[in-house]
Image (spheres, rainbow, N blue to C red):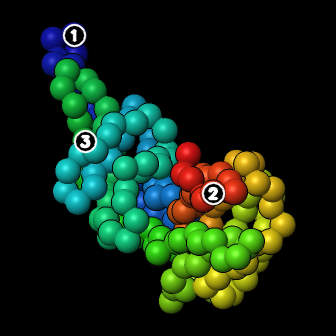
Amino acid sequence: VDDAEKVDVVPSLKKPKLKVDTSKGEMQLKFKEIDGAIGYEIIRNGEVIDQIEDTSYVDTSAKSDKTYKYEVRAVRYKKKPVYSKFSNKAKGILHAVQNFKIKTMDKDLVFTWNPSEYYTTYKLYNGDKLLTETDEGSFTLSDYKLDEVLDVSLVGYAEDGAQSPDRDRKFIVTEEEMTSE
């Protein structure tokens, strides 16, 4: 047995199971850790977009209202990379609230947007303060101070709890006219 050739048996990497979650208004990929893997490749629409060590990933470059197809594969290195099979393909789309506008009407600020088939409720914030929660496509604000910076964001919420990416506007209302900052 002393002259027998030594062979390392290295088990193959299991194929990851991928889920895409857009419920927090971002494109989040999640999967379980694969035994023996030291990292993972994130593939979007057939191209590797990142290599990570964690089991979750947020695609910060994903654009609203565009469908993406994701896959993941586990990797480890001996002398050269060893890959698992590709995960299942998982689709993701971030539905943005469209056409968010702000107008002045007399002494009021009127916020308007296009109601969506995806969202049943909308929340409008100034910073962390909730201005309104509505199922309509508009809101009128009378209670504001001139020359104060307003940092407004609009988020749509679906019945299943999913939410849209924030639509943000930062501006100051002056006596003359509204100016963007």
The residue under label 1 is which amino acid type?
Asp
Does the residue at mark 3 contact the one at mark 1 (Cβ under 8 Å)? no
Side of 33 relative to 68 (left or right): right
The residue under label 2 is which amino acid type?
Glu
Q: Where is residue 86 in the image (x, y as percent from the top left)?
A: 27, 55
- Secondary structure of residue under mark 2: loop
Residue at the disc numbered 2: 176
* Residue 78 lies in quadrant: top left
Locate the N terminus by quadrant. Answer: top left
**Along the viewing direction, whichever of 38 and 13 lies nearer the viewer:** 38
**Along the viewing direction, whichever of 51 and 178 lies nearer the viewer:** 178
Q: Position of residue 115 (x, y in %)?
A: 55, 86
Instruction: Kindly report which numbered mark, 3 or 1, lies closer to the viewer in this rendering.
Output: 3
> Separation of disc 1 and disc 2 at Cα?
93 Å
Q: Which residue is drawn at 73% across and 58% down?
A: 126
- With respect to residue 9, does 117 lie above or below? below
Instruction: Specify the label residue 2 is tagged with.
Output: 1
The residue under label 3 is which amino acid type?
Tyr
Q: Residue at x 15, y 11 (%)?
A: 3
Mark 3 / mark 1, whichever is N-terminal: 1
Instruction: Kindly report which numbered mark, 2 or 3, lies closer to the viewer in this rendering.
Output: 2
- With respect to residue 5, does 95 lie above or below? below
Q: Where is residue 6 in the image (x, y as percent from the top left)?
A: 21, 19
Side of 44 relative to 158 (left or right): left
Instruction: Specify the label residue 83 is tagged with.
Output: 3
- Secondary structure of residue under mark 1: loop
Q: Which residue is drawn at 28% across and 55% down?
A: 44
* Residue 152 lies in quadrant: bottom right
> Separation of disc 2 and disc 3 at Cα?
63 Å
Instruction: Kindly report which numbered mark, 1 or 2, lies closer to the viewer in this rendering.
Output: 2
> Separation of disc 3 and disc 1 at Cα?
33 Å
